[in-house]
Each structure stands twice: as structure tokens, then as C-alpha cells.
Image (tube, helix red, strand yellow):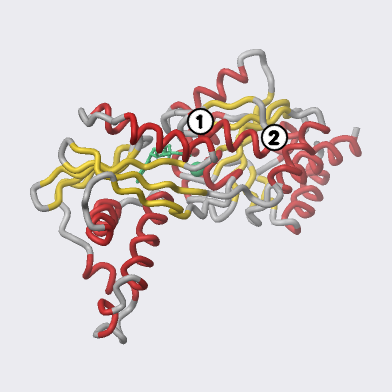
């Protein structure tokens, strides 16, 4: 494209909250054959909420949530945020006495006063978190985390997790030392425009694909809801870039749409990387396009803009 065409397209994009980083990116976007979407925060709203907390032992619910929230307090993960929010809610509404002396304190300071001391906190990407509280090892995360740590999962627990996953929820398991204590069910609804955008891409001859670190069953349930047939699940954070490369093998032009820190290697590996939403600085830096409105329709806007700009100057 001529510098003028690029300038015009960049301006039109900017008016729609689509930032284009240069003419090469603009040219590549017209030839996109595959759009690979991250699931969490990209196809979904990224507003995870805990819908169930099931305790399989006699442990008190408030104490259970206190331990789990304490373990997740140092994690940046959206699932951790959801768990803390749920625990906070429980603490406020089911134990109102806890808030009475605290009228002038902020919610954050009240909750942090309620949380337990944690040592040796480790975030395990694609698995969950691990730490020690009161001398006990606390694990909060997926099956992989449990099996790798020698925690066995009973049939009752497994069936409960499967049921959550079949309804598109993520099951987060909680173990103290070697015993599985409970499971949290977490839902993250689709963005409202997701179904229409997936359909729109297909009509444009572009194939949508979903990639996620989440488990296969949840991934398939979400993909089904959104109308995507091709899914790659249980992909470790570093593996997303490898997924991109598989689709590039025959020379196809591949776009990746993602929002998180985990997505930046994939955004960089893609021919067209699109960071969506507030994004993280690192994702924005790795991307060729920044979709500032956090609306998936802008994936179509970006491709359209590229096609139209380049058609006009030919
Ligand atoms: P995504 O690709 O959907 O953004 P991630 O790679 O970040 O997913 O995480 C994959 C899975 O690892 C999650 O679905 C969850 O089971 C587990 N996990 C990661 N971080 C945490 C955490 N802080 N607490 C609990 N589970 C977690
Ligand atoms: Mg994500």
C-alpha cells in the first residue's frame, strides 16, 4: 500500500479504536486465513465468577474459603480474582459481624486482615497455585496440579468436576496436604458479540479456531456455544505460539487474538497479532493491532479495513 493509503486506513482504524502498527500489518491482514482466539478474556468476558463451592469434608465453609482466598491472594490470574471476590462476598454477607468494627476501613483492608499468612507461594502457569498455610501444603488448581502433586481424585470429586465442565464451567480443585477438600465451579460468560463475529468470519472465508489452557471438556462446551469447531485445549502458556506455527506451516496467514500475558508469545508468532481490551502492556507490545474497545467485532473491522484499503489502491 502507498503511504497515503496506510495513513488513511490508520486514521479510520483509530476512529474505531483499532490501532494499526504499520503498513506491513495492514497488508498481511487482508490475507488472513485463520483467526486463532484465546478463550479466557478474549471470547469470554474475562469476568469469571464462582458459581459453586462444594466441600467434600466436614470443613466449615467460611474457613474453607478463607484458606483458598489466602492461597490465591498473590495470584494475578482472573480465576484468583474470582475466588477472592467470592470469599469476600461470603465474609461480608454471611458473617456481618466481621464488618461492624470496620466501618471506615476499605473493603481491601478488611479482607486482607481476614486472610491467613502464606509462605512459599508459587504460581504454576497452566496449573494453579501452591503455598503453605499453618504448616499445611495448600494446592488450588486443576487436575494436572493434583496428580503431579500426588493428590488422588475420588470418583465422587471427578464426577462433580465433569458435571461443571460439561456446562462450560471450570472446576478448580483444592487440596490441603494430600487430601482433596473441595471444588470451586467458575463460570465466565461469552462476550455478547462472540457468536455473531465467529459467524461473520466464516462468511468472509476466514476459519476461527480456539486455543486455551483450560481443560478439554470446558473448552469444547464453550466452543460449541460460540460456534467454533476447531479447538486446542490444555495448551501450556508457551504452547500457544506452537499452535500458531502449525497453522502457518503451509504458508497460510494466521491471526491471533488474545488479551493476556500468556498470549504475547503467540501474538508475536502470528502473522497478525491482535491484542484486545485493556490487554497487558506486554501483549500490546507484541501485537500488530490493538483493539481498544474490547469488542470482537473489531477483528472483522480490522480485516475489512485492510481488504478495502488495499482493493482501492490496486
Ligand atoms: P487460559 O489459556 O484460558 O487463559 P491459563 O493457561 O491461564 O488459561 O490457565 C489454565 C488453567 O490452569 C486454568 O483453567 C486453571 O485450571 C489453572 N490455573 C491457572 N492459574 C490458576 C490459579 N491462579 N488458580 C487456580 N487455577 C489456575
Ligand atoms: Mg487469556
Could you tell me which residue is drawn at 71 percent across and 49 percent down?
193
Q: Which mark is residue 120?
A: none
Residue lying furthest left = 135
Instruction: Identify the residue at image location x=50%, y=30%.
Output: 217
Quadrant of the rendered image containing residue 155: top left
From what the image shows, is residue 35 above or below residue 12? Answer: above
Quadrant of the image containing the C terminus: top right
Q: Quadrant of residue 15?
A: bottom right
Please name the residue that numbered disc 1 is placed on. 217
Q: Which residue has dot 2 on it?
A: 227
Neighbour tally class for label 2: few under 14, some 14-19, many 20 plus, Cα within 10 Å: some
Say which quarter of the image contains residue 138: top left
Locate residue 26 relative to residue 105 in the image: left or right: right
First in sequence, mark 1 or 2: give its number: 1
Relative to the observer, which residue lies in front, 222 or 208?
222
**How far across and how far down the image is residue 147, in percent?**
27, 27
Amino acid at each position: 500500500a502507498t503511504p497515503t493509503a496506510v495513513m488513511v486506513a490508520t486514521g479510520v482504524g483509530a476512529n474505531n479504536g483499532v490501532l494499526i502498527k504499520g503498513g506491513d500489518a495492514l497488508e498481511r491482514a487482508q490475507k488472513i486465513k485463520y483467526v486463532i482466539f484465546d478463550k479466557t478474556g478474549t471470547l469470554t468476558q474475562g469476568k469469571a465468577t464462582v458459581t459453586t463451592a462444594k466441600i467434600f469434608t466436614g470443613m466449615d465453609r467460611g474457613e474453607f474459603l478463607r484458606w483458598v482466598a489466602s492461597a490465591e491472594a498473590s495470584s494475578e490470574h482472573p480465576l484468583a480474582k474470582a475466588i477472592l471476590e467470592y470469599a469476600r462476598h461470603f465474609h461480608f454477607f454471611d458473617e456481618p459481624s466481621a464488618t461492624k468494627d470496620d466501618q471506615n476501613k476499605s473493603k481491601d483492608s478488611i479482607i486482607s486482615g481476614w486472610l491467613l499468612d502464606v509462605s512459599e507461594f508459587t504460581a504454576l502457569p497452566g496449573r494453579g497455585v501452591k503455598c503453605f498455610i499453618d504448616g499445611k501444603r495448600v494446592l488450588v488448581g486443576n487436575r494436572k496440579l493434583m496428580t503431579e502433586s500426588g493428590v488422588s481424585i475420588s470418583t465422587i470429586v471427578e464426577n462433580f468436576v465433569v458435571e461443571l465442565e460439561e456446562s462450560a464451567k471450570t472446576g478448580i480443585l483444592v487440596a490441603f496436604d494430600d487430601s482433596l477438600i473441595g471444588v470451586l465451579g467458575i463460570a465466565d460468560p461469552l462476550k455478547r458479540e462472540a457468536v455473531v463475529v465467529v459467524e461473520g468470519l466464516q462468511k468472509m472465508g476466514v476459519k476461527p479456531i480456539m486455543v486455551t489452557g483450560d481443560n478439554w471438556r470446558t473448552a469444547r462446551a464453550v466452543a460449541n456455544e460460540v460456534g467454533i469447531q476447531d479447538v486446542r485445549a490444555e495448551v501450556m502458556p508457551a504452547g500457544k505460539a506452537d499452535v500458531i506455527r502449525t497453522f502457518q506451516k503451509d504458508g497460510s496467514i494466521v491471526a491471533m487474538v488474545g488479551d493476556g500475558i500468556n498470549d504475547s508469545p503467540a501474538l508475536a508468532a502470528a502473522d497478525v497479532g491482535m491484542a484486545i481490551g485493556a490487554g497487558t502492556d506486554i501483549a500490546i507490545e507484541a501485537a500488530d493491532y490493538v483493539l481498544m474497545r474490547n469488542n470482537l467485532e473489531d477483528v472483522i473491522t480490522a480485516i475489512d479495513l485492510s481488504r478495502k484499503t488495499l482493493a482501492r489502491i490496486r
